[in-house]
Amino acid sequence: MMAGPKAAIKADPLSFKGWPRDRARRRIRFIKEYLVTPRGHGAGKPVNLRAFQKEIITGAFAPGIRTALISIPRANGKTAIAAMLGLAELFVGPMSAEVLVVASDQRQANITFKLAKRMVELNPELADRTHIFSDRIYVPETDSTLVPLPAEYGALQGYDPSLLIVDELHVVTEDVWSAAVTAAGKRPESLTLAISTPAASEDSLMWRLVKHGREDEDAQFYLREWAAPEGCEVTDRDAWRIANPALADEDPFLAEDAIEAVRKTIREPVFRQLRLGQWAKGIDSWLPFGAWEDLAAPEVVVDPKQKIVLGFDGSASGDSTALIGCTVEKQPHVFVAGLWENPHDPRWRVPRREVIDQIRYMFNHYNVVELAADPWGWRTELEELAQEFGEKRVLMWNTAQAQRMGPATDRMYQAVVNKELTHDGNQSMANHFSHAVAKSSTVGDLITKDKRNSPRKIDAAVAAIVALDRSAFHSKKAGRKVASFKR
């Protein structure tokens, strides 16, 4: 794409004489006759519209439809169908068509824009009749424009779209949606088309719209959902094909081994949401449903002579405080050595002396090779313990350091899902694990509470992660010098 003034269009206008006036059939014909697949399966060849893609177009562009919502898993060509329909609108839509492609941010919106741009470039007939700018595509003969925009309230002001495409509705807020549909409702025939995977929560705009569509009482609203059957196993490949039309097609452009590779690397609720199209409970939950409970072994008794590590996550005031033990062995056993929780009393404070007495008890009655403790709010007491039991046996382990907590969290996750540990079945500790939600970082998932100041505590889970990490250190690196608390 050259910078500077654009050359005048000299090519004769395309002729669509004799084409169907039906909006859906008109767009399907344009896509099949003029668009070329830019990449991936079938790259360089004319677009082969699959049956499910034709179904989307036929349903969304049916007479009287003003809003269409397509819920479909990832990797089923959402971006491609958005780019195709955007270009079709410029050439066979109404005069002075205005196409807005709205995504979570400008970068994401530009992905669809660049795909549409490439489709134009691959067909000389379209390229000769189109101006491609850095921020829009313009067709002079129809006075039509395609613009990529971020899903921001201010960015949507001042437009009059004939087609508004919303990519990944699950990240769009109520105010942005209101601005979008208000802008798109100015023309006699305009369509807002949202294409998205399910949202991560039922507390979302998308879920509200899905429920609206399921009621089937709005003749101007079209809903089509692709999802695996409820209750299916994540390994059920027949369910994969039900949810993923690009996999079930006679000429599939999605492969089973690609889905399997994804399944092995992401948490089950996320896989159900993104790859099975399901409204899964606990999308943000850190562990798969029931995974921690399945490892309960209350019959296990820790021998006082057996090496153990203690993980400690303490509160300075009215929050919970956890002391979790973990045996040092090939298949470690995690157990509650002490857990102090606020009984919903605003006046309650952590019994600090009781906590320290319990730590001393563990040192005096068990073979504690190390206490790994988050020092926040407890530095004085921990320094006293280091002097009493030896600096090499009391380690400062800052849980706020993502570089340390990320790998440790991953270690616990892998140990749980691969059934490489057991625990005492303590219900309070199980509750703390169930409360933990995953927060992505550059060093892997971290765990956090569901929201700031949430009463749903996770301290026992944090302490268990620390204990398991240090247990693995002592198990695999026997004899290695351990840094002291004072480092």
Image (cartoon, helix red, strand yellow):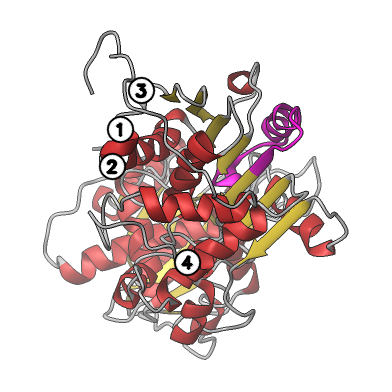
What numbered label is drawn on residue 131?
Answer: 3
Label 4 and label 3: CA atoms lie apart by 37 Å
Mark-to-mark CA distance, 1 and 3: 8 Å
Q: Position of residue 284 (x, y in %)?
A: 56, 56
Residue 183 is one of the magenta-drawn residues: yes
Q: Up-down: is 252 above or below 131?
A: below
Q: Are marks 4 and 2 in contact (CB under 8 Å)?
A: no
* Mark carried by residue 127: 1
Q: Nearer the viewer, residue 451 or 383?
A: 451
Residue 458 image offset from top left, x and y in percent: 57, 55
Please state, as top left, top right, bottom left or bottom right, where the N terminus lies in the image: top left
What is the secondary structure assignment of the residue under circle 4? helix
| Mark 3, other Cα within 10 Å: few <14 / some 14–19 / many ≥20 | many
Cα separation between marks 4 and 1: 36 Å
Q: Which residue is label 2 attached to?
A: 123
Seen in the image, is 186 located left or right of residue 476?
right
Label 1 close to label 2 by CB (< 8 Å): yes
Secondary element at tag 2: loop
Q: Nearer the viewer, residue 60 or 468?
A: 60
